[in-house]
């Protein structure tokens, strides 16, 4: 049975006990519909409840608003109801993925130029090698795919040159290049080459600024979160950002607080998972994001917990997203509290070996069940009876947290 410690102090009782919670989940760069997250939550929460010894059930959400569902959890005799909502921007992601094969190679050149000409790629490698390798992976693979297609064209041309003039044979041989590249595109679900490139291209297109259509969507998210904060029947409003959803969550919550939707000591909490913030915050025109990072890091209207894991090669594990972005204030920095999900300790050796080379699966492990969870349990956080601030009130940061910053002085905030 999962044991939940609740403070006996009367002053902490309201903060500790959550009867109703509103959860807003901001996905990363993901073209899939929100029902995918519903099914993931349903399956993984059932497994985690069985492992940890509590009860959890899920049902459809009724009424208007974003896509979501309702979770009821019973932990040590305490019942909590949480409404989980997906703040969807998958339509914007899909629109950004419409480039054809040859347009993708144009994007490859443009994106590589942005990251190389600004020096961002080299600074990212100095910060953490894993995500830097992930950034180079689509470049290497797309070039390799092109070389395979060209080699096949030369082979066909050589064969045809025995029957027709050589120049015509090699010209006709080029006709195999498009279908070969299209074939690689069709099996991208196994290799994620085009997906990763389009992700980086989306970030680099405006050199660190969000496109106008995404900015408008973030304003819609602000309105939804603000409405939840005004609901007196809700004990906690928890915003969860995963991967690219982390830097979007930072911008959204900065706007929520600036707009006066949250007050000091309020019920607002932010859970950031597997962040890749430097991929955007290091770009030269990401000044607004860096300002939002600095602003949010000082606010007492929320509690911000950042969770990463060294085993996740797609995130900047234990790198403070504020400090490493050059956004830390000289004084008064409060957030985030950074901890490790410790995959090697919270998963059995068999499970970890199973997923070790499945990098995208490990990147989503934060949303999944753990064989032997430590203090990080996604389902107790999003559906259990303790508020995030109370659950991690006395938690110290995990060891080896990096505050290193490799931004040039010209991009630091004063």
Image (cartoon, helix red, strand yellow):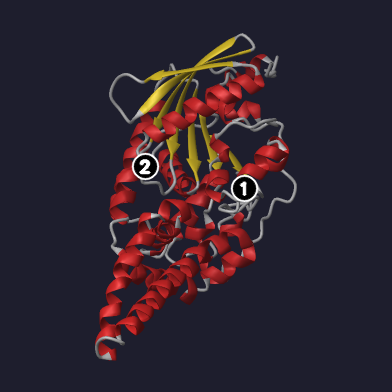
Label 2: element kind = loop
| Residue situated in front as seen by the camera: 353 or 323 | 353
Q: Residues within 10 Å of mark 2 (few under 14, many from 20)?
A: some
| 88 with respect to 389 (left or right) | left
* Quadrant in the rendering for residue 8: top right
Residue that mark 2 sits on? 32
* Quadrant in the rendering for residue 207: bottom left
User: Which label was assigned to residue 333?
Assistant: 1
Residue 390 visible here = yes
| 114 with respect to 405 (left or right) | left
Q: Residues within 10 Å of mark 1 (few under 14, many from 20)?
A: some
Q: Is residue 18 above or below residue 347?
A: above
Marks counted in the figure total 2
Residue 249 placement (x, y as % from top left): 46, 43
Q: Is residue 66 above or below residue 62?
A: below
Q: Is residue 403 above or below residue 296?
A: below
User: Which label was assigned to residue 263?
Assistant: none
Residue 14 placement (x, y as % from top left): 58, 17
Quadrant placement of the N terminus: top right
Residue 171 placement (x, y as % from top left): 26, 83
| Residue situated in front as seen by the camera: 256 or 382 | 382
User: Which residue is rendered at x = 50% and y = 20% of the image?
Assistant: 235
Residue 228 placement (x, y as % from top left): 40, 26
**Sequence-first tag of 1 and 2:** 2
Q: Is residue 108 above or below residue 57?
A: below
Quadrant placement of the C terminus: bottom right
Label 1: element kind = loop
User: Which residue is rendered at x = 54% and y = 25% of the image?
Assistant: 45
Judged from this view, the residue extending furthest toward the right is 399
User: Which residue is rendered at x = 64% and y = 12% of the image?
Assistant: 76
Badges 1 and 2: C-beta atoms under 8 Å apart?
Answer: no
């Amino acid at each position: 049975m999962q044991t939940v410690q609740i403070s006996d102090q009367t002053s902490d009782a309201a903060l500790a006990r959550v009867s109703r919670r509103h959860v807003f989940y901001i996905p990363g760069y993901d073209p899939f519909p929100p029902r995918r997250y519903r099914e993931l939550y349903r399956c993984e929460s059932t497994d985690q409840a069985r492992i940890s010894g509590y009860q959890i059930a899920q049902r459809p959400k009724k009424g208007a608003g974003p896509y979501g569902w309702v979770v009821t959890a019973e932990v040590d005799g305490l019942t909590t109801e949480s409404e989980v909502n997906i703040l969807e921007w998958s339509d914007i992601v899909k629109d950004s993925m419409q480039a054809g094969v040859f347009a993708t190679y144009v994007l490859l050149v443009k994106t590589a130029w942005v990251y190389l000409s600004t020096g961002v790629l080299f600074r990212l490698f100095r910060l953490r090698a894993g995500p830097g390798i992930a950034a180079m992976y689509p470049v290497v693979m797309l070039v390799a795919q092109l070389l395979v297609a060209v080699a096949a064209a030369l082979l066909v041309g050589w064969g045809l040159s025995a029957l027709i003039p050589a120049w015509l044979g090699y010209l006709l041989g080029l006709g195999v290049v498009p279908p070969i590249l299209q074939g690689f595109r069709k099996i991208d679900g196994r290799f994620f080459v085009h997906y990763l490139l389009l992700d980086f291209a989306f970030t680099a297109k405006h050199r660190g600024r969000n496109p106008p259509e995404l900015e408008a969507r973030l304003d819609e998210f602000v309105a939804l979160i603000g409405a939840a904060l005004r609901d007196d029947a809700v004990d906690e409003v928890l915003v969860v950002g995963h991967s690219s959803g982390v830097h979007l969550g930072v911008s959204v919550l900065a706007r929520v607080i600036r707009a006066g939707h949250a007050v000091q000591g309020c019920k607002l909490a932010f859970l950031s998972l597997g962040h890749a913030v430097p991929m955007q915050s290091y770009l030269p025109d990401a000044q607004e994001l860096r300002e939002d990072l600095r602003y949010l890091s000082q606010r007492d209207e929320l509690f911000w917990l950042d969770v990463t894991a060294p085993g996740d090669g797609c995130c900047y594990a234990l790198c403070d997203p504020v400090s490493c972005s050059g956004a830390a204030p000289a004084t008064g920095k409060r957030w985030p509290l950074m901890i490790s999900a410790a995959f090697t300790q919270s998963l059995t050796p068999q499970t970890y070996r199973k997923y070790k080379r499945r990098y995208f699966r490990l990147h989503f492990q934060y949303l999944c069940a753990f064989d032997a969870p430590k203090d990080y349990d996604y389902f107790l956080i999003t559906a259990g009876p303790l508020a995030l601030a109370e659950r991690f009130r006395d938690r110290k940061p995990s060891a080896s947290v990096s505050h290193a910053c490799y931004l040039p002085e010209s991009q630091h905030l004063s």
